[in-house]
Every structure is written in C-alpha cells, then in structure tokens.
Image (spheres, rainbow, N blue to C red):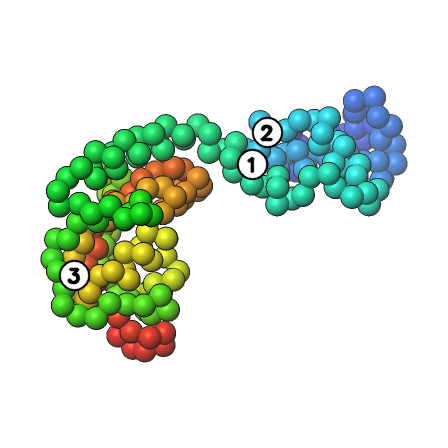
Amino acid sequence: MSCGGNNAVSDADASKGSGVNLDSANSKISYALGAQQIEGLIQQQLIEYLDFEAYVAGFEAAFKGDSLKVSFEEAFALLQQEKSKPFLKNKELGDQFLAENGQREEVTTLPSGLQYEVITAGTGPKPGLNDQFVAHYTGSLIDGTVFDSSVERGEPLTYMVNQVVPGWTEALQLMSVGSKWKIYLPSELAYGETGTPGGPIEPYSALIFEMELLDIGKPGESQ
C-alpha cells in the first residue's frame, strides 16, 4: 500500500474503497491519512503489536477528547518489554557467565553486580561523580566479539563520569589515574532491556570492558 503519487488510485477506484463513500475531498484525505498511519506502523515494525479493536478505541477516545485508559508512557514501557522478550536468552547467558567469572580469584564482585579485575594499579587521584575523565577502552560481548574500541581508533574517550552507563560510573570512581581494569557488567549496569537499537548490543547483554583511566578534570578544563 502506498500513498505516493505514482501509485495513486483513480478517483473512480478510490470511491469504491472498502465499501466507504469516498466521493468527497475530505473522505479521500481521511482515507489516505488512515492508510499512511498504518504504513508508518509497518515501517517502524510495530504492526505485529497492533490489536485493531483497541487501536480504534484509542483513536476514538483521542478524537472525542476523552481521558485515555492507557498513558503513552505505560504503552511505551510495555512496548519495550514486548520487543525485548526474544532476547531474554541473553540475560540467562550473561548471568551464567558472570556467576562463573565471579569464582575466579582475581575477580572482585561488588553488591551492585559489577565485577572487576585489576590489570594495572594506578597511583593517581580518583574521579568523582561530577568529574570529567579521559580513558581508553575496548568493549566486547561475552563471546569475545569486540563492538567498540577507542584503542583501535587511536583516540581516548573524554566524557563525564555521571553520563555513562551505570557500570562505568561505578567503576570509574573506584579507579585511580593510571589504572587499567577489566570490568564485567550485567545488562542492568550496561544497556539493559533496550540494548543499542540498530547497533551491535542486543537487549539484556552482559558486557566486558578493558579500561585505562588516563586523566581526570573538572567540566570545561582542557585536558
């Protein structure tokens, strides 16, 4: 189905659509708007979640100005849950990996679930929550697949401690400048149930990062 000009149906054909009277300009516009909305759901891969009866009920409620029985925020949260269900296996695999990894003598497991091992112990200061940090890192999945590396790019990351994933925020505040750690993050301390949409990290993925803290500073300071 398309509303594009090259695929537009003739007026005669349009007037027969689905037994609806499409003789007026407004009826044709309304018909096309309805089709366009559904096409948008198809393109966004949301059509599989559509309950048509409930969809029409929501449309009518909004059209009439009635109070909505389901908020947009609740619906979005439910949508994220439904979309992430096929990836729950990642959660199981991640939990199993972390349970086994935590048994290694060189690995420390914190109450949050964050695991780390010290490769090199630095002697410099530790960053605070509101500090800026400079670090090299290599991120990988638990199967060893590297998905990102500042080392390969040849340029360290400069960012705020309080603006990265929770596992990084926690680990960075424990590291001294000059330290090199390997950290292991359960999904809830990484990208959670959403992963990186369109990217390499699937929902519920546990992640591994090798990090080297190079420098710290206050926001706005040149490094």
Helix, strand or loop at disc 2? helix
Q: Is residue 30 depicted above or below 108 in this figure?
A: above
Please give the name of the residue rendered at 83% of the width and 21% of the height, measured from the top-left corner. Answer: 19
Q: Is residue 202 depicted above or below 109 in this figure?
A: above
Image mark for residue 49? 2
Please give the name of the residue rendered at 38% of the width and 37% of the height, measured from the top-left corner. Answer: 204
- Residue 218 visible in the shown view: yes
Sequence order check, earlier mark of 1 and 2: 2
Sequence order check, earlier mark of 1 and 3: 1
- Residue 198 visible in the shown view: no
Please give the name of the residue rendered at 14% of the width and 64% of the height, measured from the top-left corner. Answer: 122
Where is residue 116 shown, x and y percent of the image?
21, 49
Where is residue 56 shown, x and y percent of the image?
75, 31
If the image is split into quadrants, where does the C terminus sit? bottom left
Q: Is residue 186 depicted above or below 162 in this figure?
A: above
Where is residue 68 shown, x and y percent of the image?
74, 41
Query: Tag 1: residue type?
Result: Leu
Image mark for residue 79? 1
Of circles 3 and 2, which is in front? 3
Of circles 1 and 2, which is in front? 1
If the image is split into quadrants, where does the N terminus sit? top right
Q: Is residue 218 depicted above or below 143 in this figure?
A: below
Is the residue marked by circle 3 packed among few (<14), some (14-19), or many (20+) residues within 10 Å? many
